[in-house]
Image (cartoon, coloured by chain):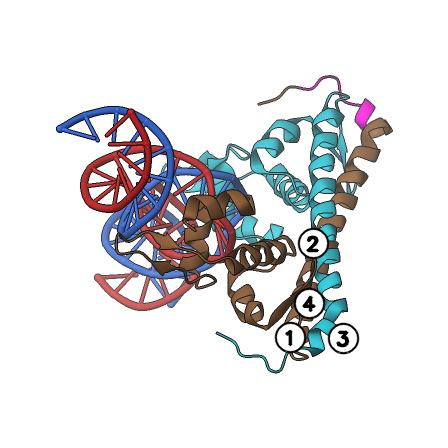
Chain colours: A brown, B cyan, C blue, D red
DNA sequence: ATTGACTCTGACGTCCACGTGAAACTCTAC
DNA sequence: GTAGAGTTTCACGTGGACGTCAGAGTCAAT
């Protein structure tokens, strides 16, 4: 199938599909005209790529883990034990990012909580720049 | 004081201080030579900027809320009631970002959890691209 | 032959708080 | 007067998964 159909069937864009090829995640054949020709299994592959992107992995990491993944019905399953190492590193990265954002929210909450304090009421007016 | 001293006293860099001025968060006077001349209260202002940045606000939002903030000892306190609206919007943004990352981590966890499944063992070897 | 839908390859834009030089000027101390 | 530390503006680089043109070729149907 051509790029337009694959885009429709995977709920993504043609630009994204070309980008995945650029990142070496897809390798479609070419027609004499230069048109990309995708195979049925590419539908699954693109969905897997999107799942991994949604899981916070970048394209480089996806390139490493994708050939080692198996699709089991709806589930995406790693087929190699050493794969867990890479995935756990990314999980760690995600956890750190979450912690950072939660810390930021606590800072913001502390500021908001001070809105009714005596110091706040000492000010006459609010004049933006 | 000049830019180097302010950078040292606030634990930031000269580049950052020039950037804050570019974003209209600071307005230092100028010496005849062109050197920036900061005042004592700028130390507090820069610390407030850093606090708000750490709270996940961007410089545009900081520009809006900074003139309405009061420093109460160590605490940064909003002096205007309508300020809470802006801050609560940013809190909402933070919460959404946290939720997104947590969802991503759950996706990743589901993938990792599948590593020992029957489908995973059906595969012979792992051959990266 | 022509329209119109589809596809191609570049290549720059996005977001944003700075990092990192480059080349030139200022100020202080000796 | 000269070395050296401090400062100035200008301007590109960063990260990352694409969005969004521009200009041109492909293909099926009329």
Per the model, the C-alpha gap separating discs 4 and 1 is: 10 Å
Per the model, the C-alpha gap separating discs 3 and 1 is: 12 Å
Q: Badges 4 and 3: C-beta atoms under 8 Å apart? A: no
Per the model, the C-alpha gap separating discs 1 and 2 is: 18 Å
Name the residue tied to disc 3: B116
In this picture, which residue range is highlighted in magenta?
A: A120-126
Question: Dot 1, how many residues are within 10 Å of its Cα: few (below 14), some (14-19), or many (20+)?
Answer: some
| Mark 4 and mark 2 on one chain | no
Query: Which residue is at 64% across, 75% downward?
Result: A83
Name the residue tied to disc 2: B104
Q: Earlier in the sequence, mark 2 or mark 3?
A: 2
Name the residue tied to disc 1: A83
Q: Which mark is residue A77?
A: 4
Q: Nearer the viewer, mark 4 or mark 1?
A: 4
Assign the magenta stretch its main secondary structure.
loop
Q: Helix or strand or loop: what does disc 2 sit on?
A: helix
Asked if residue A125 lies in the magenta stretch, the reply is: yes
Q: Earlier in the sequence, mark 4 or mark 1?
A: 4
Q: Chain of mark 4?
A: A
Q: Helix or strand or loop: what does disc 4 sit on?
A: strand
Q: Nearer the viewer, mark 2 or mark 3?
A: 3
- Depth check: B55 or A128 in front? B55
- Depth check: B40 or B77 in front? B77
- Depth check: B54 or B38 in front? B54
Quarter of the rendering occupied by the C terminus of chain A: top right
């Amino acid at each position: 199938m051509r790029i337009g159909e694959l885009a429709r069937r995977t709920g993504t864009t043609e630009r994204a599909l070309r980008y995945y090829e650029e990142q070496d995640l897809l390798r479609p054949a070419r027609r004499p005209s230069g048109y990309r020709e995708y195979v049925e299994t590419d539908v699954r592959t693109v969905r897997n790529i999107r799942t991994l992107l949604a899981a916070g992995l970048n394209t480089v990491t996806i390139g490493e883990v994708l050939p080692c993944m198996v699709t089991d019905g709806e589930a995406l399953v790693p087929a190699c034990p050493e794969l867990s190492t890479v995935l756990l590193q990314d999980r760690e990265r995600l956890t750190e990012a979450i912690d950072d954002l939660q810390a930021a929210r606590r800072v913001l909450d502390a500021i908001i909580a001070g809105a009714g304090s005596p110091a706040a009421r000492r000010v006459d007016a609010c004049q933006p720049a």
